[in-house]
C-alpha cells in the first residue's frame, strides 16, 4: 500500500488525515456531496501534507478511443485551474467510479478501465505533476492502479468500509455534512417523465398550448402580457406547493407532480423560454420562496418530455441557480449540468455553471436580482451580472471560495476548478431542422405548428432561437 496521507482543512482548523486507498475511497462522497456514478474524479493535492485542493468530475467516455484526448484535457484543466487559485498542485489523486452491468464483475470493470487510468497518469506526468494514487471503485470494492503489493491491494480488490464506520464519516457527521445519494439518483429527480401515459398527456398539453401562446410571446405588443401571466401562474403554483406538508424527497416529488396540471405546467414551461421572464422568475431565490421555487422548477423540468426536452434548459437552470443560492452546491452543479445537456448553448446555464465551479459568492447575483426583480429591468441582466462575476473570478486566484455545500465545515477545505466542457456533447451536436420541417416518425401525425410538404412556417416548439434573441 502507498504509505501516504492527505490532510484536509485549513492549518488552523480541524485536520482529518486519510491513510491509504481505503480511506481515500471512503472520503470521495464527502468531497463531492454525492456518490459519483460512471465518473472520473480528479483531486489536486497541495503541500507536503497533501491538502485537498481543486477537483473535477466528468462522465467516463464510453468509447476507449476518446480516453487519451479526454485524459489530456482533464489533466490540463485541473492543473491550470488549480494554478489560478491554490497554486500548482504537488500531486493528484484519481478515482474511476463505475459499477459492472451485473453488479458482481467489478474486477472486469477495473481491468477494462485500466488503460484510461494509465492515460490519466501519463497526462498528469507529462505536465510534471505525479499521480499519487489512482483507484477504481466498482460494485462496493476498490482497487489501486498504483500499488503493486498484493498483500495490501489484492487482485480481487477490497470491500469498501461500511457506511458510517470511518474517521471521515465521523468527522462529517460531527460537521453536519451529508451525502446526497448517488449522482444517478440526483439526476433522476430532474429527468423527464418516462411512463408512456404521463409523458403522452404532458406532451399533448404542450402541443395544445404552444400554438396560441408562442405567437403572443414573439409579438412585442403582447410579450409583456404573457410574461405577467406566466409569473402570476408560477407564483400561484409555488403557493400551492408551499401549503403541502413536508415529506421525504421521493414522496414530495410525487406529491408536487400531482398538484400541477398538464396545462398549467405547459403554460409556465413555454413562458419561461423568454429570457426576460426567466430572469424575473430567478428573483425567487431566498427563504420560503427559494425552497418552493426549487420544487416548482424541478417539477417543470420533469414535464419537458419528448420533443420538448430542450425546453428543460430554462427550469433546470433556475433550479440550479436557486439550489446554489440557498447553499446546495452539489445539487446546483447537477441541475446546471443537465441544463447544458438539454441545450449546450444555453448562456445563462453556462455562466452559472462556471460561476458555481469557480467558487463565486452567489450574493453578487442575488443583489442584482433583489434590485431589479420588481422592475422592468434590461434584457438578460442576470446573465450580464453572472458573466461579470465569472470575469472577476478568472482574473485572480483569490476569487475562488472555500468549500462547497457538502464540504463547508472547517473539517474540509476543497476549492473548485473550472468545469471541463463535455466532449461527447460537443461532438454530437444538435440537429436543427428548418422551421416547420421536422422529419416525422413513420406512422406519426403532424403536430400543431408544422406545415404541409413544401411550405415553411414557424414551429412553436422551436421559437426563440439565437436569431430572435429571446432564449439564452
Image (cartoon, grey):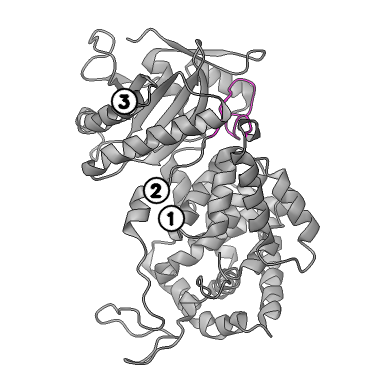
Q: Does the stretch in magenta take in 402?
A: yes
Mark 2 vs 3, N-terminal side? 3
Mark 2 vs 1, N-terminal side? 1
Label 1: element kind: helix
Mark 3 vs 1, N-terminal side? 3
Residue pointed to by mark 1: 341
Quadrant containing the C terminus is bottom right
| Count of numbered tags | 3
Front of the two marks 3 and 1 = 3
Up/down of 205 relative to 318, above or below: below
Residue pointed to by mark 2: 422
- Give, as a single range, the part of the protein colored magenta: 400-416
Distance in Å between CA atoms under marks 2 and 3:
20 Å
Q: Can residue 163 be seen in the rendering of this structure?
A: no
Q: Position of residue 22 (x, y in %)?
A: 38, 17
User: Local crowd at mark 3 within 10 Å, few (<14), some, or many (≥20)?
Assistant: many
Q: Can residue 305 be seen in the rendering of this structure?
A: yes
| Dominant secondary structure of the residues highlighted in magenta in the image | loop
Q: Residue at x 58, y 57 (%)?
A: 348
Q: Quadrant of residue 129?
A: top left
Residue 121 numbered tag: 3
User: Local crowd at mark 2 within 10 Å, few (<14), some, or many (≥20)?
Assistant: some
Marks 2 and 1 close (CB-CB < 8 Å) = yes
Quadrant containing the N terminus is top left
Amino acid at each position: 500500500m502507498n504509505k501516504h496521507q492527505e490532510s484536509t482543512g485549513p492549518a488552523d482548523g480541524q485536520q482529518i488525515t486519510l491513510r491509504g486507498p481505503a480511506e481515500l475511497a471512503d472520503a470521495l462522497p464527502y468531497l463531492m456531496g454525492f456518490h459519483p456514478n460512471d465518473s472520473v474524479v480528479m483531486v489536486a493535492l497541495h503541500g507536503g501534507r497533501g491538502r485537498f485542493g481543486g477537483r473535477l468530475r466528468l462522465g467516463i467516455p464510453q468509447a476507449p478511443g476518446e480516453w487519451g484526448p479526454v485524459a489530456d484535457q482533464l489533466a490540463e484543466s485541473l492543473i491550470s485551474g488549480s494554478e489560478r487559485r491554490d497554486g500548482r498542485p504537488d500531486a493528484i489523486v484519481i478515482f474511476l467510479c463505475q459499477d459492472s452491468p451485473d453488479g458482481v464483475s467489478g474486477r472486469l470493470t477495473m481491468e477494462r478501465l485500466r488503460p484510461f487510468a494509465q492515460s490519466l497518469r501519463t497526462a498528469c506526468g507529462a505536465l510534471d505533476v505525479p499521480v499519487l494514487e489512482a483507484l477504481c471503485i466498482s460494485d462496493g470494492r476498490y482497487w489501486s492502479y498504483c500499488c503493486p503489493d498484493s498483500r495490501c491491494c489484492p487482485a480481487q480488490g477490497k470491500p469498501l468500509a461500511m457506511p458510517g464506520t470511518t474517521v471521515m464519516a465521523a468527522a462529517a457527521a460531527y460537521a453536519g455534512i451529508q451525502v446526497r445519494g448517488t449522482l444517478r439518483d440526483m439526476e433522476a429527480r430532474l429527468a423527464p417523465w418516462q411512463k408512456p401515459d404521463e409523458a403522452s398527456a404532458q406532451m399533448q398539453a404542450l402541443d395544445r398550448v404552444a400554438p396560441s401562446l408562442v405567437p403572443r410571446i414573439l409579438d412585442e405588443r403582447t410579450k409583456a402580457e404573457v410574461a405577467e401571466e406566466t409569473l402570476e401562474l408560477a407564483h400561484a403554483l409555488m403557493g400551492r406547493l408551499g401549503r403541502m406538508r413536508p415529506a421525504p424527497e421521493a414522496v414530495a416529488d410525487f406529491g408536487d407532480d400531482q398538484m400541477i396540471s398538464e396545462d398549467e405546467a405547459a403554460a409556465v414551461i413555454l413562458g419561461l423560454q423568454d429570457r426576460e421572464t426567466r430572469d424575473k422568475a430567478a428573483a425567487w431565490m431566498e427563504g420560503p420562496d427559494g425552497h418552493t421555487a426549487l420544487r416548482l422548477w424541478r417539477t417543470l423540468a420533469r414535464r419537458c418530455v419528448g420533443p420538448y426536452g430542450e425546453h428543460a434548459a430554462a427550469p433546470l437552470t433556475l433550479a440550479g441557480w436557486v439550489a446554489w443560492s440557498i447553499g446546495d452546491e452539489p445539487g446546483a452543479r447537477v441541475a446546471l449540468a443537465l441544463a447544458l445537456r438539454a441545450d449546450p448553448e444555453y448562456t445563462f446555464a453556462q455562466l452559472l455553471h462556471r460561476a458555481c465551479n469557480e467558487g463565486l459568492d452567489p450574493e453578487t447575483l442575488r443583489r442584482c436580482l433583489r434590485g431589479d426583480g420588481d422592475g422592468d429591468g434590461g434584457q438578460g441582466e442576470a446573465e450580464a451580472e453572472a458573466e461579470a462575476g465569472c470575469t472577476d473570478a478568472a482574473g485572480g486566484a483569490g476569487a475562488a471560495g472555500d468549500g462547497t455545500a457538502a464540504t463547508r465545515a472547517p473539517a474540509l477545505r476543497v476549492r473548485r476548478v473550472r468545469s471541463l466542457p463535455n466532449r461527447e456533447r460537443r461532438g454530437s451536436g444538435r440537429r436543427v431542422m428548418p422551421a416547420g420541417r421536422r422529419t416525422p416518425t413513420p406512422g406519426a401525425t403532424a403536430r400543431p405548428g408544422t406545415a404541409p410538404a413544401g411550405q415553411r412556417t414557424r414551429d412553436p416548439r422551436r421559437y426563440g432561437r439565437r436569431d430572435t434573441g429571446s432564449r439564452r
